[in-house]
Amino acid sequence: MSEPELIEWGQRLGADSHPQLVIALTGELGAGKTTLAQAICRGYGVTQPVTSPTYALVHEYAAPRSPVFHIDLYRIERQEDLEQIGWTDIVSSNALVIVEWPERAGDLLPAGHLPIALDYAPDKPDYRVLLAG
């Protein structure tokens, strides 16, 4: 799918999402995880700019239905480091939680999360392949 299609899909997903949902976004660097997270947030009702939490690790946004936590685990090296960012409290809160690089959470990723994988389309460099659920 093209970037505009990815954004449209993400906005629909955000509009249909509910609190206490963890969305786990996987994919290589540059595959579109943050673009998709931004679209989900917009569809969910976040009105402020959504930026990559690569260095801050966690960004929190206000939305009409609940807070939204956008977490980037790229810089997390050990599962033990997750408690330093409040992982347990965040994933068990009444919020929408979007996690980039969720594989770094290992078995601490909650059961029932929504996995979404993004990959480059083999013969179209500007397109992405999206696998959800």
Image: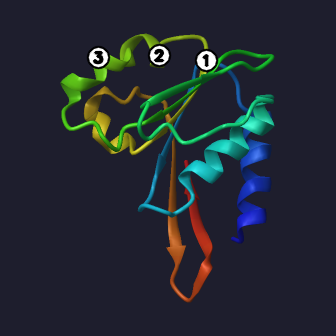
Q: Earlier in the sequence, mark 2 or mark 3?
A: 3
- At a point 78% along the width and 45% down the height, the residue shown is 11
| Disc 1 target residue | 95
Residue type at numbered disc 2 = Ile
Quadrant in the picture for residue 87? top left
Q: Earlier in the sequence, mark 3 or mark 1?
A: 3
Q: How far is disc 2 from disc 1 in space, using C-alphas?
A: 8 Å
Q: How far is disc 2 from disc 3 in space, using C-alphas?
A: 10 Å
| In the foreground, 16 or 82 | 82
| Disc 3 target residue | 83
Q: Which mark is residue 69?
A: none
- At a point 53% along the width and 11% down the height, the residue shown is 93
Judged left or right of residue 78, residue 122 is: right
Farthest residue to the front: give it.
Answer: 55
Find out whether the residues at labels 2 and 1 contact each other: C-beta distance under 8 Å: yes
Q: Is residue 118 above or below residue 38?
A: below
Q: Earlier in the sequence, mark 2 or mark 1?
A: 2
| Disc 2 target residue | 90
Residue type at numbered disc 3 = Glu
**Can you say which quadrant of the picture contains the N terminus?**
bottom right
Circle 2 residues within 10 Å: few <14, some 14–19, many ≥20: many
